[in-house]
Image (tube, rainbow, N blue to C red):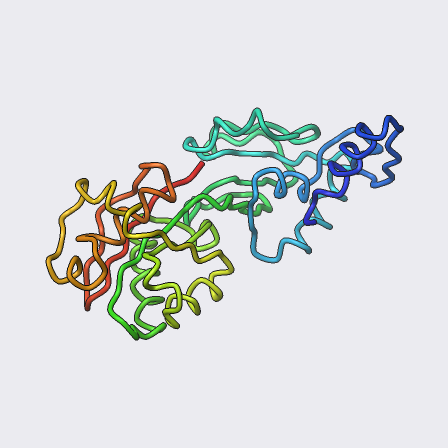
Amino acid sequence: MRGGANALTRYLAGMLGADPVITTATDVNEMSALDTLAFQLNARMTDLRTAVKTVNQMLVSHQRVGLWWDAELTEEIGQCDIRGFIPVDDLQRLPELDALICVSLRNDLPELPVLHWKLVPQRVVVGIGCRRDTPFSLLATLLARQLEAQKLDPLALKAIGSVTLKKGEPGLIQLASCCRVPFKTFTTEALREFEHHFPGSGFVRKTVGVGSVSGPAAWLLSQGQLLGETLREQGVTITLGVAH
């Protein structure tokens, strides 16, 4: 369990009526830790293990580690343990810091005059429709383009969805594996409930039983919180959504 061992210890101790024994330096010093924050946010980071060692050591050494949240994620602050971090509201007006953690779904940050890392919550879901035997390389290229169009970090991916008929589609299975996210499929009946929100195709309806796949799949994965326009190219449709 990534970064969740201490939380699990407290939970089990409570169930058993016992006192938890926690010996990690950040907990002993009654402060949070980067791995704890990553676990609570279900977030990823490039080279997380190295960053955790560095940041946690800075925290227990009472160095000033800032914590900035992208505006679209600020509602999640209350769900996280942020003890020990210095709140940062504006990246253009930083307080005195030794390091900074930026919580964001976006693929870029402004130039920052301090050592910093980006923590990326997994919130972006993808609905995909495609022809049989669509190559993985094409799917990966188009997904990367769609993410770039919305300025989203690929690490923010949470799940890929399609119609049940595509459950064994090699390109989609490989794409989900490469992105390290689950591949979820929905019945035509489930997709049909939401297809009226999207342009339909007679060919797709004849082939899979529903006029649109990517849009309804993304709708179901995100509970209707869609991002941008659907990409349609070379027999592939890709719709993005955000699942908080």
Q: Is residue 155 left or right of residue 234?
A: right
Task: Determine whether 27 is above or below 235 in the image.
Answer: above
Name the foreground residue: 54 vs 76: 76
Residue 145 drawn at (x, y percent)? 30, 60
Name the foreground residue: 243 vs 26: 243
Name the foreground residue: 73 vs 15: 15
Q: Is residue 199 left or right of residue 214?
A: left
Name the foreground residue: 7 vs 55: 7
Residue pictured at 17% horizontal, 45% vertical: 198
Residue pictured at 28% horizontal, 52% vertical: 188
Residue pictured at 41% horizontal, 32% vertical: 72
Residue 8 drawn at (x, y percent)? 75, 38
Residue 173 drawn at (x, y percent)? 43, 67
Task: Determine whether 75 is above or below 91 in the image.
Answer: above
Q: Is residue 99 left or right of residue 213?
A: right
Residue pictured at 24% horizontal, 46% vertical: 192
Instruction: Find the residue positioned furthest to the left.
Output: 202
Q: Quadrant of residue 41?
A: top right
Q: Quadrant of the C terminus?
A: top left
Q: Is residue 108 left or right of residue 4?
A: left
Task: Determine whether 34 is above or below 176 in the image.
Answer: above
Q: Quadrant of residue 17?
A: top right
Q: How many marks?
A: 0
Q: Quadrant of residue 85?
A: top right
Residue 180 drawn at (x, y percent)? 51, 60
